[in-house]
Amino acid sequence: MTSTVIFVLAENRGIPRTLSVQRMTGDGKIFLDASTIFYPEWQFQLRAVSQLIGKVFDCNDYDFLVSVDSDAVDGWSTSVPLFLLLSSAVTGEELPKNVFSTGCMFSPDGWISHGRVEAVQAKIHALEVFSQENSIQVPTFLIPFSLHKYRTEAVHLHYVTSMFSALKTTLPHTFESHSSQIENLTHVRAQRDLCHLLDYIPDAGDVFVLVPTDEHESSKSQKTSPDISEIGGTPCIKEQPLSGYMSLYFIRNNRVLFKHRYTNADRARADASQYQEVLHEVSR
């Protein structure tokens, strides 16, 4: 049984709960403990995480039982701890007892969304109390990379942009032994959204790419050349037309470091401009 503490929000307050994964001989199935109600969004999250796990690891010989010591759980913010727990269960590398995590992954591509500011801050406060009560030395919280400055007095905050950066921090031996699979998944050519723009993306250096995520829009946009400008000195490639959902990629030397989803192109460009001030956190 592999376990970690997560922080569940209740009335804008973080409450510690234990998330556990038990590995068994099987054929790749994941089961949920019936003592907890797992609402649909939580189940969708588990499906996305398990699909990513299958891309990184060979786990066809195992089944997994997932449990939480709570009456009911919902939402997507358990994506990162779920991924790390399943990775630990597959490989046998133990999770550090002083490392905790939160973050959402809406699709099985490995990239973590921004995270809701109020929710992350509430969980930071909860971890401060939990660490003091349990005498945890150097508590570390993996949280989604963000433009926001969080308040904390007793917790070390470590920003992550993807499941892969979380894995590298938490389970370094697992990350190293599966680096080739991760390299393939994070390479710019593995991103379906970018297939029409590969000729415009430089082989080296930093670049932002803003691209529609709707397949119908992408199929129309391949007939036109993209708009190429600069944001804070970094090239920005924008595919037209942009409507509905779109993704902002940050690419460095043909590797995707983060991908965020937007519904407004101006907001995406504004955020990209601010990222210039804090990009050193991404590379940590």
Image: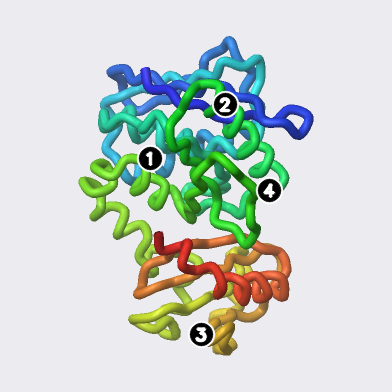
50 horizontally vs 40: left or right: left
Q: Which of pointers 2 and 4 lies earlier in the amino acid sequence?
A: 4
Mark 2 and mark 3 residues within 8 Å of each other at the beta carbon: no
**Residue 186 falls in which quadrant of the image?**
bottom left
Return the residue at label 2. 130
Label 3 vs label 1: CA separation?
A: 33 Å
The residue drawn where x is 56% and y is 12% is 34
Instruction: Please provide percent x and percent y for residue 196.
Output: 48, 77
Label 2 vs label 4: CA separation?
A: 21 Å
Q: Which of pointers 2 and 3 lies earlier in the amino acid sequence?
A: 2
Label 3 vs label 4: CA separation?
A: 28 Å
Foreground: disc 2 or disc 4: 2
Label 2 vs label 1: CA separation?
A: 29 Å
Instruction: Please provide percent x and percent y for residue 243.
Output: 71, 70
Return the residue at label 1. 53
Q: Which of pointers 3 and 1 lies earlier in the amino acid sequence?
A: 1
Mark 2 and mark 4 residues within 8 Å of each other at the beta carbon: no
Label 2 vs label 3: CA separation?
A: 44 Å
The residue drawn where x is 55% and y is 75% is 276
Residue 48 in view: no
Label 1 vs label 4: CA separation?
A: 25 Å
Return the residue at label 3. 235
Return the residue at label 4. 116
Task: Name the amino acid type tagged 4.
Answer: Arg
217 horizontally vs 200: left or right: right
Quadrant the N terminus occupies: top left
